[in-house]
Amino acid sequence: MTRTAFFISDGTGITAESLGRSLLAQFENVEIRMITKPYIDSVDKARALAEVIEATAVHDGEQPIIIDTIVDEKIREVIRGAIGFKIDIFSTFLAPLEQELETHSSYTVGRTHSIGKDEVYMDRIHSVHFALDNDDGAHTHQYGKADVILIGVSRCGKTPTSLYLALQFGIRAANYPLTEDDLDEDGSLRLPRALAAHRHKLFGLTIDARRLAAIRHERRPNSRYSSMDQCVQEVGQAEGLYRQKHIPFIDTTRFSVEEISTRMIAEMGLTRRFSPR
């Protein structure tokens, strides 16, 4: 079974898409084509989109799923007239909240993803800059300012996780690669000197060696770096270091960056500077 889902907004569409994807992900036996339509902020745009939705219904032989966060009543009325199973997020939740809070919503377009409070926006920017400046072991002298330091072998997910933590939560995350330069004479990894003073901030990432080899093969095919033997050795050494030094860690193989980040925040007791968008 294949269905089409439209995520519609008069703003960025991020809220409609995020909630829509979360809901539809629960239906694994249904193939869903997802289409995001942001900035439907005029009646003319809404009418044009309604025609697309109508044509999609005819093509699919099934009514599309419509998930929207439209604020303007005139635009919402046009979308309501299109054929589809509709989930109006704002009207569904705002009316009960208005009753509970005994006040009316401002019904402001783009409220969630606008700059809003300048200090929150700037905190987000500073956190992203920190993650970029402290990627891959750069500027270890700044580790005193870090909230968390991700460690792990090359290509195990340190950089995307650091950036996600910065962008979504304002967490200042540095990351440090564990390499052969950190090996002791017995072949085991030692805790690098740059990290020793910040052990309480360390969080390890590991990954299935087969998955790591596949990722590295895309970067450097048929190299020692991407060989299965090398990946097995590096992963084993990293996990040995985590256990020896009692460093918390997570296997990134089957977790998304969102799951990795939230699990890390919970385990490390990190403070979010703001809520995710």
Image (tube, grey):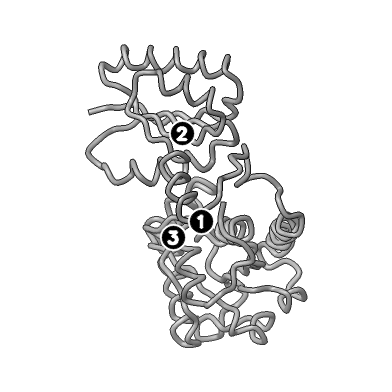
Identify the image quadrant of residue 227.
bottom left
| Nearer the camera: disc 2 or disc 3 | 2
Dot 3 corresponds to which residue? 259
Q: Amino acid at mark 1?
A: Leu
Residue 185 drawn at (x, y percent) = 55, 85
Q: Nearer the viewer, residue 195 or 164?
A: 164
In three-dimensional space, the C-alpha distance between marks 1 and 2, rounded to whole angstroms, equals: 23 Å
Please determine whether, in this image, residue 217 is positioned above or below residue 237. Answer: above
Under circle 2, the secondary element is: strand
Under circle 1, the secondary element is: helix
Q: Nearer the viewer, residue 221 or 32?
A: 32
Q: Earlier in the sequence, mark 2 or mark 3?
A: 2
Please determine whether, in this image, residue 87 is positioned above or below residue 149. Answer: above
Q: Amino acid at mark 2?
A: Asp
In three-dimensional space, the C-alpha distance between marks 3 and 1, rounded to whole angstroms, equals: 32 Å
Q: Image point 50% across, 61% down: which residue? A: 156
Dot 2 corresponds to which residue? 68
| Nearer the camera: disc 1 or disc 2 | 1
Residue 89 drawn at (x, y percent) = 44, 40
Identify the image quadrant of residue 192.
bottom right
Classify 10 Å Cα crowding around label 3: few (below 14), some (14-19), many (20 and above): few
Whether tag 3 and tag 1 are in contact, CB under 8 A, the answer is no
Q: Image point 61% across, 73% down: which residue? A: 148
Under circle 3, the secondary element is: helix
In three-dimensional space, the C-alpha distance between marks 2 and 3, rounded to whole angstroms, equals: 25 Å
Quarter holding the N terminus is: top left
Q: Amino acid at mark 3?
A: Glu
Q: Image point 67% across, 67% down: which residue? A: 172
Q: Earlier in the sequence, mark 1 or mark 2?
A: 2
Dot 1 corresponds to which residue? 101
Q: Image point 42% across, 35% down: which residue? A: 88
Q: Earlier in the sequence, mark 3 or mark 1?
A: 1
